[in-house]
Amino acid sequence: PAGMVLSVLVILLLSVLYEAVKMGKAVLLRRALLALPRSLSQEALTEPQEGNSGPGQGRWFWFHVGQTLFHVLQVVLGYMVMLAVMSYNAWIFLGAIAGSTLGYFL
């Protein structure tokens, strides 16, 4: 029983973390879109323009890198939760559902 309770708690926490990573990825997307230069020419993307060196100029690439890392983490967590649910254990399934619900709520 103790092992099962621990397994359900771990799956619950993984599901909460999955939802948190989804939210973090959305926040980074919004920041990346705000950091894009007004002109999408190659020169504007690689070098900041004179007199227009705002805080977001040139940082959009690093936001994209952060989004990529969040995406990889989201895929890994999603597959881990999916594999746990595919054990066809009702308690594990309920832990994944409860964790996803709690993570979305938070």
Image (spheres, rainbow, N blue to C red):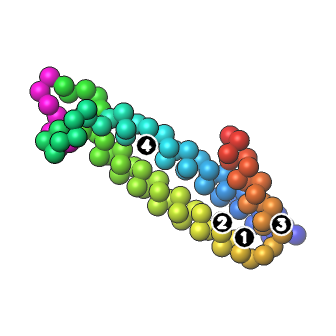
Label 4 crowd (10 A; few <14 / some 14-19 / many >=20): some
Discs 1, 3 touching: Cβ within 8 Å: no
**Label 3, on which residue?**
91
- Identify the secondary structure beneath mark 1: helix
The residues colored magenta run 45-51
Give the quadrant of residue 50. Answer: top left
Q: Is residue 103 shown left or right of residue 91? A: left
Q: Is residue 8 shown left or right of residue 52? A: right
- Identify the secondary structure beneath mark 4: helix
**Label 2, on which residue?**
81
Q: Amino acid at mark 3?
A: Trp
- Residue that extends furthest to the top in the rendered view of this protein: 51
Give the quadrant of residue 84. Answer: bottom right
Q: Amino acid at mark 4?
A: Leu
Q: Residue at x 76, y 57 (%)?
A: 97
Label 2 crowd (10 A; few <14 / some 14-19 / many >=20): many
Q: Amino acid at mark 2?
A: Val
Q: Which is more foreground, mark 4 or mark 3? A: 4
Query: CA separation, marks 2 and 4?
Result: 24 Å
- Identify the secondary structure beneath mark 2: helix
* On-image quarter of the N terminus: bottom right
Label 1 crowd (10 A; few <14 / some 14-19 / many >=20): some
Q: Give the mark nearer the N terminus: 4 vs 3.
A: 4
Query: CA separation, marks 1 and 3?
Result: 9 Å
**Label 1, on which residue?**
85
Q: Give the mark nearer the N terminus: 2 vs 3.
A: 2
**Label 4, on which residue?**
29
Answer above or below: position of 30 versus 69: above
Q: Give the mark nearer the N terminus: 2 vs 4.
A: 4
Q: Give the mark nearer the N terminus: 1 vs 3.
A: 1
Q: Which is more foreground, mark 1 or mark 4? A: 4
